Amino acid sequence: DFRMVVGEDKTKVLNIVKPNIAHFRELYGNILQENPQVVYKIQQGRLEIDKSPEGQFTQLMTLPKSLQQRINHIMDPPGKNRDVEETLLQVAHDPDCGEVVRLGLSAIVRPSSMRQSTKGIFTAGKNLRKFLLTEPAGLSGVSTPG
């Protein structure tokens, strides 16, 4: 998300998740325990996802169709016209599988976040202009360095 690069607090997600970790464990614990692709490593206190090509293919097949199609578009050379499942099988065997998924997500999220950021900048400027034109008394207590 473009906003996480420019202008957003880079620790925003951590600040939301960390104080709520117990709630997230309660909320998602059963789902993760029932998932055969996830193994809980008790000694390390963490979850591990099956990173074998078969495990990654299973995970890729559960992604939203729009993301699968975006990955297919990124990976399918022009003129080849492979189906999505064939492309995902290839990606599952690729050591850069995670990066390919990130590229697909970025291609979906970037246009929307850029529009939102542009709207935010435009709206902020419009609101400041409106404030300066309609509220000159609001600035009377503001001193300028001199």
Image (cartoon, grey):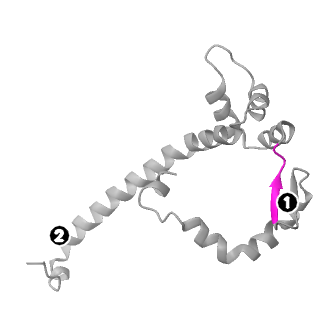
Of labels 1 and 2, the one closer to you = 1
- Residue drawn at x 54%, y 66% is 11
Q: Residue at coordinates 56% horizontally, 40% vertically from top-left? A: 107
Which residue is most to the left?
146
Amino acid under label 1?
A: Leu
- Point out the image quarter for the C terminus: bottom left
Q: Main secondary structure of the magenta part?
A: strand
With respect to residue 32, does 62 lie above or below?
above
Tell whether 96 sits left or right of 30.
left
Rendering coords of residue 64 (x, y %):
72, 43
Outermost residue, bottom side: 141
Quadrant hosting residue 101: top right
Q: Amino acid at mark 2?
A: Leu
Describe the element under mark 2 as helix, strand or loop.
Answer: helix
Which residue range is magenta in the image? 46-51
Residue at 66% across, 23% down = 76
Residue 88 part of the magenta-drawn span: no
Q: Secondary structure at mark 1?
A: helix
Left or right for 55, reference 140: right
The residue pinned by badge 1 equals 32
Question: Against 97, is 14 above or below?
Answer: below
Tell me the quarter of the picture where residue 105 sits.
Answer: top right
- Reading the image, the residue beneath label 2 is 133
